Image: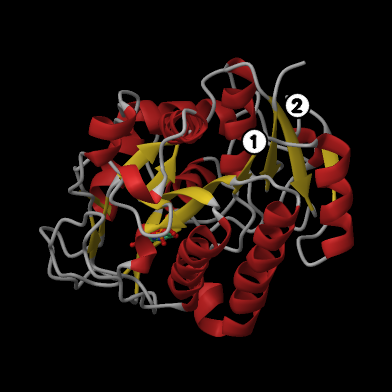
């Protein structure tokens, strides 16, 4: 029997792609999701357990039933604008929920843990490329909640032998090239799917959030990673932990928590992404210019090669034409909930 991996948020955007990658690598992904933003139809590659991370008894039941060898923790609230308006929702929904999960995993003896963190933990470093050693100073409760969970993992590593890989994602984009799963949020807030909605008339126009930043064209710069490359890193990280790596003695991690940035090292402005979307889809992008979005960093670009050096990770699919092309193919299927 293949090893099982508990995937929280497996019905969501990145989690569903991770399930596909885990199944392809010979694992059984067990999705744990409350479907607050995820989709039942996105669970295609292994069993589904509906549940809420705040429900400790339900978590214990799922650990006991499946005996997973590891956890991949994707379930989270992840919108910067909402986090600015409703910080309590982020501290409860991300931090309290993750504490429950981590304690349940430790109590079940499931000590290998892969965690979705974010470059939003860095805050604004004004043009500096970011790596694992860059000081974290989040600008919003989303980034702050993810940083708190990183710290929690370090403490549980030191005290209980939990071994974790923490991936700080830059901007995740694209979709499964087979269009079995893809990005589908309601409402959508992320740049590339919003552009695609503007192209096909699902919204009147894309609003550019701020055009007066100190960047080459006045719009914010981000480092975009293809979701398939991103989830490949998770499988590599899992294997690395399972090979007995990631312990305090043989890594530079604190308390058995090892951090890797997942970005390409190239930043693109909002206007550059719009131009590439026009070329990749062959459609004009209806747009308007709006004010800055509170909590946005000017530029977030990874300067780290560590995931490549240590895990052997490559971001070969992470070009804007490929990410937008795969997202467009998925978008044209109409998504979930039809
Ligand atoms: N953005 C925008 N209009 C939109 C959505 C996003 O101008 O409708 C900008 C956003 O302000 C940021 C960049 O695009 O500068 C990427 O935003 P996204 O929400 O996709 O990811 P984030 O960087 O917040 O994780």
Q: Position of residue 327 (x, y in %)?
A: 49, 33
Q: Residue at x 10, y 58 (%)?
A: 216
Quadrant for residue 100, please give it.
bottom right
Q: CA distance from mark 1 to mark 2?
A: 8 Å
Judged from this view, the residue extending furthest toward the front is 249
Instruction: Write the residue at 28% across / 51% down.
Output: 252
Instruction: Give whichever of 293, 258 is nearer the camera.
Output: 258
Ligand 1: quadrant of the figure = bottom left
Query: Where's residue 170, x and y in %?
Result: 35, 50
- The x and y percentages for residue 101 are 70, 59
- Residue at (21%, 48%) from the top-left corner? 267
Left or right: where 65 falls relative to 121? right
Quarter of the picture holding the C terminus = top right
On screen, residue 335 above or below 46: below
How dense is the environment of label 2, judged by Cα within 10 Å: few (below 14), some, or many (20 and up)? some
Helix, strand or loop under label 2: loop
Numbered badge on residue 184: none
**Label tally:** 2
- Residue assigned mark 1: 16
Dot 1 falls on a residue whose secondary structure is: helix
Q: Closer to the camera, 103 or 24?
A: 103
Task: State if disc 2 and disc 1 touch (CB < 8 Å).
Answer: yes
Residue 186 found in image quarter: bottom right
Q: Which of the labelled discs sits on residue 44, or is there none?
A: 2
Residue 165, relative to residue 132: is it above or below? above
Point out the tag, 1 or 2, that comes first from the N-terminus.
1
Label 1: how many Cα within 10 Å (few below 14, some 14–19, many 20+): many
């Amino acid at each position: 029997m293949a090893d099982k991996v508990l995937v929280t948020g497996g019905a969501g955007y990145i989690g569903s792609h991770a399930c596909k990658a885990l199944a392809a690598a010979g694992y059984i992904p067990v999705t744990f999701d409350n479907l607050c933003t995820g989709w039942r139809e996105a669970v295609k590659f292994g069993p589904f357990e509906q549940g809420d991370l705040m429900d400790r008894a339900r978590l214990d039941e799922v650990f006991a039933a499946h005996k997973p060898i590891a956890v991949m923790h994707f379930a989270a609230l992840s919108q910067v604008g909402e986090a600015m308006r409703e910080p309590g929702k982020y501290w409860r929904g991300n931090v309290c929920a993750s504490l429950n999960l981590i304690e349940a995993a430790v109590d079940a003896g499931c000590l290998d843990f892969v965690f979705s963190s974010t470059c939003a933990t860095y805050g604004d470093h004004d043009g500096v490329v970011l790596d694992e050693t860059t000081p974290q100073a989040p600008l919003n409760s989303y980034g702050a909640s993810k940083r708190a969970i990183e710290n929690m993992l370090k403490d549980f590593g030191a005290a209980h032998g939990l071994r974790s890989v923490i991936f700080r994602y830059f901007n995740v984009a694209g979709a499964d090239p087979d269009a079995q799963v893809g990005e589908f949020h309601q409402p959508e807030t992320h740049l590339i799917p919003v552009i695609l909605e503007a192209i096909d008339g699902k919204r009147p126009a894309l609003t550019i959030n701020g055009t007066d930043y100190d960047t080459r064209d006045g719009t914010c710069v981000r480092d975009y990673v293809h979701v398939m490359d991103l989830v490949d890193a998770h499988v590599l990280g899992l294997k690395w932990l399972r090979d007995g790596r990631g312990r305090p003695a043989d890594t530079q991690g604190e308390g058995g928590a090892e951090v890797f940035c997942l970005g390409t090292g190239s930043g693109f402005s909002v206007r550059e992404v719009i131009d590439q979307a026009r070329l990749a889809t062959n459609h004009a992008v209806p747009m308007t210019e709006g004010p800055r979005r509170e909590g946005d960093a000017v530029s977030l670009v990874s300067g780290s090669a560590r995931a490549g050096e240590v895990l052997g990770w490559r971001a070969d699919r992470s070009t804007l034409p490929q990410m937008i092309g795969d997202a467009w193919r998925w978008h044209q299927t109409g998504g979930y909930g039809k």
